Amino acid sequence: MQNLNATGAALSDRVATVYKELFSSLPVIDGEVVQPQMPVTQLSYFIQQALDRHYLVRLQFKSAPDVAPATAIGHLKQDAAGHLILKQTKQLTTIVAENLLRSVQRVK
């Protein structure tokens, strides 16, 4: 039974990847849709909105060509020193450098 669930999950993941590759107007690398690079002013504005309104956001980081970009989902916070912090879970926190971001999207 457990093997059947693992096989079904793997098949489901593969179908989702193929769907993205076929129907996405954006490039797809290793199953990850590569978002266009947002202008610095737009990144700053979206980050400020996420901080002010406590949005759940998806951050996509810059990467080398032909390498899938890293993506992280969580809530942005700012510490006293002004550093951006992405709280993904109670145990996982990431310090975010704004100059390494490709895009910020609100997760609904």
Image: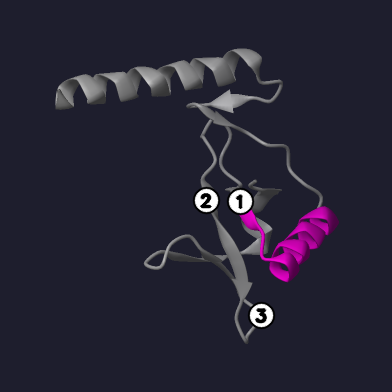
Question: For the point 41% across and 68% down, which residue is it?
Answer: 90
Q: Mark 1 points at which residue?
A: 59
Q: Label the magenta part by its dominant secondary structure.
A: helix
| In the depicted structure, whether residue 75 falls above or below residue 6 | below
| In the depicted structure, whether residue 3 falls above or below residue 38 | above
Q: In which quarter of the image is the N terminus?
A: top left
Q: Start and end of the magenta stretch? A: 40-59
Q: How crowded is mark 1: few (under 14 residues within 10 Å), some or many (20 or more)?
A: many
What residue type is disc 3 on? Gly
Question: Is 90 inside the magenta-drawn segment?
Answer: no
Secondary structure beneath label 3: loop
Between 36 and 48, the residue placed more toward the observer is 48
Dot 2 and dot 1 residues touching (CB under 8 Å): yes
What residue type is disc 1 on? Leu
Q: How crowded is mark 2: few (under 14 residues within 10 Å), some or many (20 or more)?
A: some
Question: For the point 41% across and 24% down, which residue is it?
Answer: 13
Give the residue at the far bottom of this rendering. 80
Q: Residues within 10 Å of mark 3 (few under 14, many from 20)?
A: few
Secondary structure beneath label 1: strand
Between 62 and 24, the residue placed more toward the observer is 24
Task: Answer left or right for 103 relative to 6.
Answer: right
Q: Mark 3 points at which residue?
A: 82
Q: Name the residue under label 2.
A: 72
Question: For the point 57% across and 21% down, which residue is it?
Answer: 20
Could you say which disc has been placed on residue 103 in the image? none
Alpha carbon distance from label 2 to label 1: 5 Å
